[in-house]
Image (cartoon, rainbow, N blue to C red):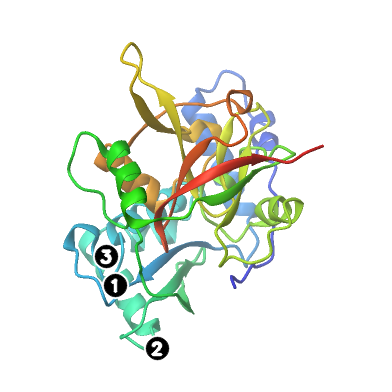
Amino acid sequence: MRTHRTQHKVNNRQAFNSVSDQLTEPTLFRIAYATMAQNLPTNFLIFTSIRYEPTASDNAVNFPHYLLPFHLARLRAAAAAFNLVNVQEVLADEKAALSLLRTTVDNAVPDKTKPWRVNVRFTPDAQITASTTPLPPLKNNIMSLPDTKSLPQFLQKEAHRRGLPHWDVVVDSQPTPASPFTGHKTSVREMYNAARERANLVSYDEPREILLWNENGEVTEGSITTVYLWREASGTGARRLVTPPLRCGPNASSTRRYALSKGLCDEEAVRLEELKDGDEIWLSHASDGFSPGRLRFLKT
């Protein structure tokens, strides 16, 4: 079970209203995030969840520290977004930062013969802590994406070959507004907790998820997963996978970064009304890899 810390809301719009309309947009954003950093609570954290997997040896995904460079990238992005200067300084040198994350994970793992989820957290003053949760062994999980131009088709074939079950993905009944706290993994989790409660999702160990959408009716993410949706490739009749762009409000997760780097998907906005009950989608999570899902609209 995951631990959720005290949550806090920040109204970024106040920062914009206090400055001149003549300032450029980049300047406005810098002022807004600087103001946000000053108002963050002392217990605010940015964090990432790394799978420690001793039974696999695929260097392409950095086992035993699954997708470690992509976890570093997301932490750096979060530190920049919230103007956490001390964290930015600690993570500035890539080699040193990777070594710090690797050492933190290794020191946190109580038994290096078993898989663990390791939550690595940073406070605004760059204090780093970690906690562990035991994970089930890998079975038929798709953790690594090969170098191929037909990755979406690879996923479909592998799902069939490995007998992967489809996750039950309920479409949320209410919007979750986009914000810096949906774009980055932080201790502010109340919007995700509320969404899971609406779908009666209690356990994080079951293959169940809720599909979130923003105030503009655009799909964003799952409560704990990145989502990939099937669209038709223009003029070819073939299908391709897309994931919502960051402007829609999804979390810039480590698996999302990995999927984009491998060419699994394009970034494209998808509106809620474009989806149908029973549609197949794909999900990714840093503990479980890539899994197929099936959409389900709740009956009203």
**From mark 3 to mark 2, how far is it between C-alphas?**
20 Å
| Residue bearing the label numbered 2 | 110
Q: For mark 3, does the 10 Å Cα neighbourhood hold few (<14), some (14 to 19), or many (20 or more) residues?
A: some
Q: Nearer the viewer, residue 54 or 253?
A: 54
Q: Amino acid at mark 3?
A: Leu
Q: Is residue 269 above or below residue 51?
A: above
Q: Which comes sooner in the sequence, label 2 or label 1?
A: 1
Residue located 64% across and 34% down the image: 214
Residue 234 in picture, x, y percent from top left: 36, 14
Q: Where 172 sits versus 161, above or below?
A: above
Query: As drawn, is 201 to the left or to the right of 73?
Result: right
Q: Secondary structure at mark 1?
A: helix
User: CB of mark 3 within 8 Å of CB of mark 1?
Assistant: yes
Q: Name the mark nearer the viewer: 3 or 2.
A: 2
Q: Identify the amino acid type marked 2.
A: Pro
Q: Which residue is mark 3?
A: 98
Residue that numbered label 1 is attached to:
102
Helix, strand or loop at label 2? It is loop
Kind of residue indicated by mark 1: Arg
Which quadrant holds the N terminus?
bottom right
